[in-house]
């Protein structure tokens, strides 16, 4: 089972526009207890603003939103969101897998990804917390997905021909399939199943069709 981003994302997203005053944006973030907000103009994602944008560009070292709102720096919060927002936010599509989302967050060192469709319209947001529930799936569910969706549906093979063991998200594959291509397909499929941490494979193939001479 490949869980898609649309299945775990938050669809009811709190957004602001690029013309929103910075003071209003800061109040919204503190009231809603979020550290970042997508910036949307006419339905399209145009940027994202985070607490670090305020801290690094408007506040001194060590200050945060609360200090700026209620402390000596409150008067310094002027201008609009468009003045300090990140204009090239990292995004992900709703039909991409949660595995892809997790990898992107890890590579970029971020906590959330706006979800946009092909036209650039914001349709949701996915966070690390949304992904945690997926990657905490029980081992027996992971094994079932690999056998039913991988061995049976993808390869059309006898499920008894492949042994699938899962422990703490680590998959071990053993047994035999017909072709080297099928072996590689199943190994890659297993890596992409939600909740899989690693794949160890001892699969064998009866025929190596990759070495056949061209006809």
Image (tube, helix red, strand yellow):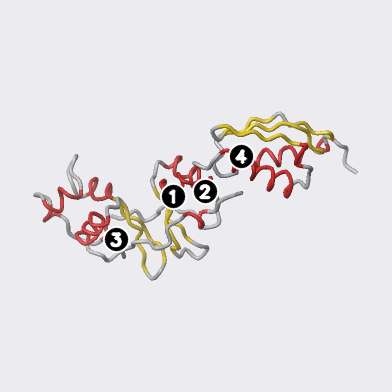
Q: Earlier in the sequence, mark 4 or mark 1?
A: 1
Q: CA distance from mark 1 to mark 3?
A: 28 Å
Nearer the observer: mark 3 or 4; the answer is 4
- Residue sitting nearer the eye, 58 or 95: 95
Decide: few, some or many residues near mark 1? Use Cα within 10 Å; few <14, some 14-19, many ≥20.
some
Name the residue carrying label 4: 191
Q: CA distance from mark 3 to mark 4?
A: 40 Å
Residue in the image at 52% along x and 43% along y: 137
Q: Earlier in the sequence, mark 1 or mark 2?
A: 2
Q: Secondary structure at mark 2?
A: helix
Residue in the image at 71% along x and 28% along y: 202
Position of 117 relative to 208 (above/below) = below
Q: CA distance from mark 3 to mark 2?
A: 30 Å
Q: Secondary structure at mark 4?
A: helix
**Mark carried by residue 82:** 3
In the rendering, at what x and y percent does residue 35 appear? 30, 50
Q: CA distance from mark 2 to mark 4?
A: 12 Å
- Residue sitting nearer the eye, 125 or 107: 125
Name the residue carrying label 2: 98
Q: Secondary structure at mark 3?
A: helix
Q: Earlier in the sequence, mark 3 or mark 4?
A: 3
Position of 127 relative to 17 (above/below) = above
Image quadrant holding the C terminus, namely: top right
Q: Earlier in the sequence, mark 3 or mark 2?
A: 3
Name the residue carrying label 1: 130
Decide: few, some or many residues near mark 4? Use Cα within 10 Å; few <14, some 14-19, many ≥20.
some
Q: Earlier in the sequence, mark 2 or mark 4?
A: 2
Nearer the observer: mark 4 or 1; the answer is 1
Circles 1, 2 touching at the beta carbon (< 8 Å): yes
């Amino acid at each position: 089972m490949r869980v898609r981003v649309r299945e775990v994302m938050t669809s009811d997203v709190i957004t602001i526009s690029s013309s929103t005053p910075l003071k209003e944006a800061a109040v919204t973030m503190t009231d809603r207890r979020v550290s970042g907000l997508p910036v949307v103009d006419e339905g399209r994602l145009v940027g994202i603003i985070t607490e670090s944008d305020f801290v690094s560009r408007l506040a001194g070292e060590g200050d945060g939103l609360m200090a700026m709102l209620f402390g000596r720096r409150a008067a310094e919060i002027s201008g609009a969101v468009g003045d300090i927002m990140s204009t090239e936010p990292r995004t992900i599509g709703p039909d991409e897998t949660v595995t892809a989302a997790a990898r992107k967050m890890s590579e970029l060192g971020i906590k959330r990804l706006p979800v946009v469709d092909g036209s650039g319209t914001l349709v949701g947001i996915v966070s690390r917390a949304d992904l945690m529930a997926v990657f905490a799936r029980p081992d027996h569910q992971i094994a079932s997905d690999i056998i039913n969706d991988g061995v049976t549906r993808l390869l059309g093979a006898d499920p008894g021909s492949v042994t699938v063991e899962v422990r703490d998200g680590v998959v071990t594959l053993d047994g035999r399939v017909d072709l080297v291509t099928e072996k590689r397909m199943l190994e890659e499929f297993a890596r992409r199943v939600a909740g899989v941490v690693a794949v160890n494979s001892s699969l064998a193939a009866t025929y190596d069709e990759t070495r056949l001479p061209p006809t």
